[in-house]
Amino acid sequence: MAGNEWINGYLEAILSTGGGASTTVEEQQRVAAAARESGDHFNPTKYFVEEVVSAVDESDLHRTWLKVVATRNTRERSSRLENMCWRIWHLARKKKQVEGEEVQRLAYRRWEREQGRRDATEDLSEELSEGEKGDGIGEIIQIETQQKKMQRHASSLEIWSDDKKEKKLYIILLSLHGLVRGENMELGRDSDTGGQIKYVVELARALAKLPGVYRVDLFTRQISSPEIDWSYGEPTEMLSASPDEDDDDNTGESSGAYIIRIPFGPRDKYLEKELLWPHIQEFVDGALAHILNMSKVLGEQVGGGQPVWPYVIHGHYADAGDSAALLSGALNVPMVLTGHSLGRNKLEQLLKQGRQSWEDINSTYKIMRRIEAEELSLDAAELVITSTRQEIDEQWGLYDGFDVKLEKVLRARDRRGVNCHGRYMPRMAVIPPGMDFSNVVIQEDGPEADGDLSQLTGGPDGSSPKALPAIWLEVMRFFTNPHKPMILALSRPDPKKNITTLLKAFGECRSLRKLANLTLIMGNRDDIEEMSSGSGSVLTTVLKLIDKYDLYGHVAYPKHHRQSDVPEIYRFAAKTKGVFVNPALVEPFGLTLIEAAAHGLPMVATKNGGPVDINRVLNNGLLVDPHDHQAIADALLKLLSEKNLWHECRKNGWKNIHLFSWPEHCRTYLTRVNACRMRHPQWQDNAPEDDVDVEESFNDSLKDVQDMSLRLSIDGEFVAGGGSNEDQVKRLLSRIRKQDSGSNNENSLLDNLPSKYPLLRRRRRLIVIALDSYDSNGFPDKKLIEVVQRIVKAVQLDPQTARVSGFALSTAMTMQETTEFLTSGNIQANEFDAIICSSGSEVYYPGVHTEDGKLSPDQDYAVHIDYRWGVEGLKSTIGKLMNASGGEEKHEKTSPIEEDLKSSNAHCISYKINDLSKARKVDDLRQKLRMRGLRCHPMYCRSSTRMHVIPLLASRAQALRYLFVRWRLNVANMYVILGETGDTDYEEMISGTHKTIIMKGVVSKGSEELLRGPGSYQRDDVVPNESPLVAYISETSEESIANALKQLSISGGN
């Protein structure tokens, strides 16, 4: 175009910044020279648009270009072109800036990880004998060959077999997002309803069929919305009944596989997975209620009257992993994790693209909340299941909580029985996904089997064709000659799937076009304009390339297909002696490759990711560089033209495909899970729920009347109860006198009634006071005792609810400090049913009768939270980290922290904060500890004057769930009273199925500023902005509190 020579100058500036174009200025000149030699006029504008605008991959730029082309005025057209140039140039500069920041960030993370690994190994080596000190990281890695590792694993694991039939396992699977149902799955409806949905449903069915598995529950979200089908609102859906071979005597009505839908978040709205994070706690409480009920039911059916606790809780994806960690802690059962796709890996890819800043990515994808959920899942998981080895090394290896080298050191020490000082790494296991081959009919090669479509479609003699599947007809209408071998690609229209490179390879290879047809199954679409920008851009490019290479009659791209059509599509390709191709830039696993192999299709696949492992097992195809379109074309041409090679790959695939079957997957799965450290609630045998005799039950009923409500005045003095309660006591006492004339003293009778168990198990409602109101020295605020008295008085205003209500206190103070605080207001500790102390590390029941008369913490709870508690390693490491500044050790006269032995206990390391300015944020401290293999729950409390480090799955919120599990007091019947701020575990106390009252003006200063740094997730990612279960009150009067309790009771249904 004459008059547009200025574009070359801009183009040179753009290319020099590396802004998305794959060519250099020298390459541009070479292309221009080649064009002149061929007789074509080199058009800089055309080159600019094709090579630069398309490389930036911005759909709005393409629309602008279309407007430019439509502009007839030369001056206006040049002006628009110049504006486009500047836009591209700024995008390129932004990309280069983002890439530079990413390089610095990755370098710093590498340094941090190396520092953490070095610190951990130094601490471990200090305790080794001279003979053991040779087991450094380098030597362990050197001797731990793959062959030895496989031999050792095979010898140490007990393979799950059919003789496990006598076991009656209860397995929990979690998959929260997307639309989950057993039949007519809407795969591809959106990005949340994809392969993971199919995988978990088929896994649940397959596990339920395995000997030894009694019931499998797949938990997901219940949605009742007009936007989606009514079936997603059904609370329960049966996936499969128990196996037929089971004896009728051992099979109950609850056996089999089920989808359990738990309502959480807005009931009438379908939410994308990025919007579900604030509602995770609500799901956990709902799932916990179902599990407890089902455990009791299964206990009656197959457990001999004892609850059948879940054998394992398996979380799929980050949101379910987060939930599984909390459920695992509440129930004290093992957790397994499958990531499916990982947040850190996605963040790396998005930053490399350079089109979005870190802030934009985090805002769009809630990526930091997702990454923290994955880190917590790694902390809690006994086992992490991956599809490929690549996923372990290149994806999980990016996480703070997993280090391949340190994991080998710890595993070697554990194998020799050497102390690891509380350091843990989750065990990784590669278990390829299973496949259902029940509908696949493996046929021998021959004209009837495939390769001769004329027999099906009708021969040249005019004979009528046989009835063909509808999807065959839909695909065949695109082709001039449908009898040619089919190259089949099946994937979403995602840039990562690299469909455009495949189309370019097909279009530029004349021999391939003459030999075969190409079928692209790219999801379902109605209108490209209504699709997301990424998918729409890919489809638009596909259509352009088809037109560019004039591939009409050679390429099929149907708009719609059903899930049930997919096997028929594979069968169609096999009938033509075709090939399946997966050219993705990186393929985490490649389930479609296994599906294709099962239907007799050889494969050409990317050499990046899972296909490497699949081809190693099946040996049924060729691997290629997905960036090299010529290599893709050569591999396809080789497989299609060399018939002996094609038949060999086909037979190899069929020969080894059983290794990817669901029964094989499930046996390997249960073999791995069986090797985990089994855990279950410790009171299962020594304190059954119903082990209460009639006399004790009657005595507790008497105490219910007297003790259910505390009678305190505002100034702390005891006052007589309301007339109705007093009358009830008198009536009960009069009945007792008639039965036992020797009991003539009302007060002595009530005082001497023994109770082995807390009254919590008889409460219908629990008021939990969790106000973190402290002065600048960390002591309880003087006005706090008055607020406590008003809360108690408010509950008493309604005699009907007061008689079934109990009280609990949740605090960061020790039990001794709590008792002194209550005594200052003339309140006895035994007037509370439960006291949760030291930030959730101890639980007391002041009203429980003990032989020595002394208060002691719940020992079952202590065992419950002991998981991965490494107190030795934590003490030494925290001291080093808190005294370090900028990554280097700094020895100062005054340490920013000092251990507070008086406030510490067996499951809480307490520190006093001497210099708040040098205190690390919670997320930063937890990251450093994870890198060193230490798992815990650090928090700041008492107006930032103390730091508590407690076990990983302990917290005040988790302590409430423990009360639910232990004493069957449903979390949904708890009312938690908080201030506007609090300790750094404050956010965990807000959301859930319990009701929350937030008192304004009661807590003046909390510790939340020490919770997160600037690069972390936000509070909105944890706590919902609005909830019918949360009420705010500005006044702390008894009437205001009572009204809030009543309103929450109505809105919450209790």
Image (tube, rainbow, N blue to C red):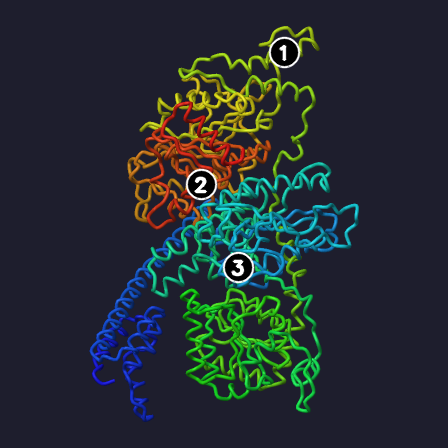
Which residue in the structure is indicated by mark 3? 193
Q: Is residue 912 left or right of residue 967?
A: left
Q: Nearer the viewer, mark 1 or mark 2?
A: 2
The answer to whether residue 240 shows anywhere in this view is: yes
Q: Is residue 14 left or right of residue 588?
A: left
Residue type, numbered disc 2: Ser
Q: Residue at x 65, y 53 (%)?
A: 670
Q: Residue at x 32, y 85 (%)?
A: 31
Residue type, numbered disc 3: Thr
Q: CA distance from mark 3 to mark 2?
A: 26 Å
**Numbered disc 3: secondary structure:** loop
Q: CA distance from mark 1 to mark 3?
A: 63 Å
Q: Which of pointers 3 and 2 lies earlier in the amino acid sequence?
A: 3
Q: CA distance from mark 1 to mark 2?
A: 45 Å
Q: Nearer the viewer, residue 194 or 917?
A: 194
**Numbered disc 2: secondary structure:** loop
Q: Nearer the viewer, residue 798 or 676?
A: 798
Q: Nearer the viewer, mark 3 or mark 2?
A: 2
Q: Which of pointers 1 and 2 lies earlier in the amino acid sequence?
A: 1
Q: Position of residue 466 (x, y in %)?
A: 69, 80
The answer to whether residue 149 shows anywhere in this view is: no
Which residue in the structure is indicated by mark 1? 733
Q: Position of residue 719 (x, y in %)?
A: 47, 12
Q: Are marks 1 and 3 in contact (CB under 8 Å)?
A: no
